[in-house]
Structures are given as C-alpha cells and as structure tokens.
Amino acid sequence: MHQADDPGIGRLQVDGGRRPASPRGHPRTWPPRKAGPEATGTRLLRFRKDRRAVSVVLITLLLLAGPLFVRPEGPVAVAWVFLNGLAVFICCIINHNHVHVRMGQTQCANRIIALLLTVAKGHTSTTVIIPHNRIHHRYGGDDRDWMPNSFAGHGWGIARILRYIVRSSVNTRRLRNLPGAATLGRRGARSQFTERVTLWTVIAITLAIDPVRSALFIYLPWLFGMAALVAVNLLQHDGCDPTSGHDHSRNFVGRLSNWLFFNNGYHTAHHLRPAMHWSLLPEFHRQIQGRMIRPELNQLSLWRFLVREYVFGSGPPTVVEGDAPKP
C-alpha cells in the first residue's frame, strides 16, 4: 500500500514507529496490491473510492455558503443547521482519512484538497497530524496520549463526553504550544500557514456578507464537527485496554454508518494499519476479528451504543457482549 505522504508524517507507524505484525497467515504486504482501491488514472485522485469523499466536501461547501444567499427561515433553517453540522463532521472524518492516505495524485492536488477540507471543516487540514497521527496512534488513549480516556472521568455518560471534549481540547492546545513540542517541519508549516490564511480570508468574507447567518450556518456547524470528532474518539476507546496490541479500540460495524462515515467504525483495523486506504478496512477487519478482537469490542450500532452507555449509562462502558454478528 501507499504510505501516507503528508508533510510531517514520514514513515509514521503505530507502536513507537515499529510496523505492527501482520495477521496470522498473511504476509507483511497484506492485503495484496490487486485488492487495493482501483486507481482512477486521472491527474487528480489516486483512488476511485475517493471520488465520493471529494463530492461530499464540495457539497458541504455549498451547504455552508447557501444560507448566505438563499436565506432559509423557520424549520428549514433549523434543519439546515443540523445538516451542516453532520456534513462538517463527515468532512472531519474525510480529512482524517486524507492525512493518513493522501487522496491526490500530485502534491498540487493534495494542497487543493487540503484547502477545500480546511474551509469545509473550519480548521486547518494539517492541525490533526501531530495530536492524532504522531501521538494518538502511538499511545492509543493511555495517559501519554494528548486526549487520554481518563479525561472523561466518571458519572453520567453525556457529562463524561462533554468533559472529555473540553479537557482534550484544552490539553491538546497546551501541549502543542510547549517549548520543544513536535512540529510539522518546514514543508508542513508552510502548508498550515497557507491553510490558515485561506480560512481567515473565508471568515472575513462571510462576516462581511452576514455575520449572524455566518455564525449560525457556518461557525456553529464547524464547532459541532470538531466536538463530534473528539467525542467519537472517546466512544472508540472508552473502557478499552490501551496497552493491548489489539483490544485498544471499539468497532462499530453497521453498514449504513460505515458508508456514511467512510468506514471510520473499523477502528482496530485502522490502528493496526494506519496507512491502509479506508476502503480496505472492512475486509481487514473480517480477517482479524475472530482471532484478534474481543467480541464485546464489536458493536453493530454506534447510535444504540451511544444511547445505552452514555444517555442511560455512567462510567466507562462495561458491555460484556458485543451485538455485532460473530465471525
């Protein structure tokens, strides 16, 4: 597979830079190249599967800009705000996939995609590389992670999620600015600077057009998307064992949610193969789930789990049996 080629990642892998072992019975080149997502042969995208991702980003940009000109009111406006929040969250997931496996064929294409993602989700595309690719994939939610599971504390599940979002966000910002903190390198810093200039230019333009509608239909969904991404990180690791080689993550294997969220539910597979294209994760998950993942860490429905363990639950999840189909 292609290694992620973003600035600042280099040959990043989990487990402190060591390449994780292949699943039993498979060589280190698993999956075979012929199983990879089909190349487009175009000058823009490497994989056909990413056409949908780019389409979602472009649609999100239209949804964000639309209310500045169409001016929806009443229930339509409320529905539009919720739709924008969902679209921004999906763009955050697309960006997560992009910083692991770049979508573009060329450096220029990847810069354009990064700028589009920056505007679609309201923060720079490269901002996740250090806390996520370099830190989270190395420590997997233990206390050395910038967003450790322990930040959620105990008590009512919704309160734990909100506490986790706030503490993780504050801690990430604090550690990012410490002397000697990891940096993106010269090329990554240039990319981030360009993304910041682009983002602040868009903010200035939208404020000039209509500050109230911009806050409601653009800035609020941006905040929701970022918060939801942090919250999902908790759901994927809360109550898991960060010291385990395989049982450090929870998986949500429902077809609809994984189609909508670009296979983000196959989280164990992603941690074991962070440079694997998102379209290959379901097959890899099927290969490893019977031998490497505790059954209770495979949940069929993200929404059912959220309601059961956080709306009506307290403390880290104590699910003793997963509801996903057994291998």
Image (cartoon, rainbow, N blue to C red):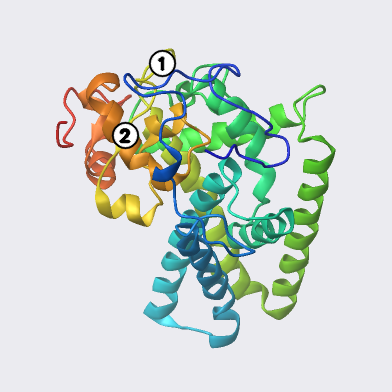
Outermost residue, front direction? 34
Residue at image location 60% in from the left, 19% down from the top = 17
Q: Which of marks 1 and 2 is in front?
A: 2
| Type of amino acid under label 2 | His
Q: Quadrant of residue 247?
A: top left
User: Can residue 100 be seen?
Assistant: yes
Q: Which mark is residue 13?
A: none
Tag 1's secondary structure? loop
Outermost residue, top direction? 243
Q: Residue 285 carries which label?
A: 2
Asked if labels 2 and 1 touch by Cβ distance under 8 angstroms, the answer is: no
Of callouts 1 and 2, the N-terminal one:
1
Residue 137 as seen in the image, left or right of residue 287: right
Residue at image location 66% in from the left, 41% down from the top = 5
Outermost residue, bottom direction? 70
The percent position of residue 109, horizontal first and vertical second, equals: 68, 59
| Type of amino acid under label 1 | Gly
Q: Quadrant of residue 4?
A: top right
Tag 2's secondary structure? helix
Q: Residues within 10 Å of mark 2 (few under 14, many from 20)?
A: many
The percent position of residue 140, horizontal first and vertical second, equals: 49, 23
The percent position of residue 88, horizontal first and vertical second, equals: 51, 59
In front: 58, or 38?
Answer: 38
Residue at image location 45% in from the left, 83% down from the top = 73
Q: Name the residue carrying label 1.
A: 245
On screen, 254 above or below 248?
A: below
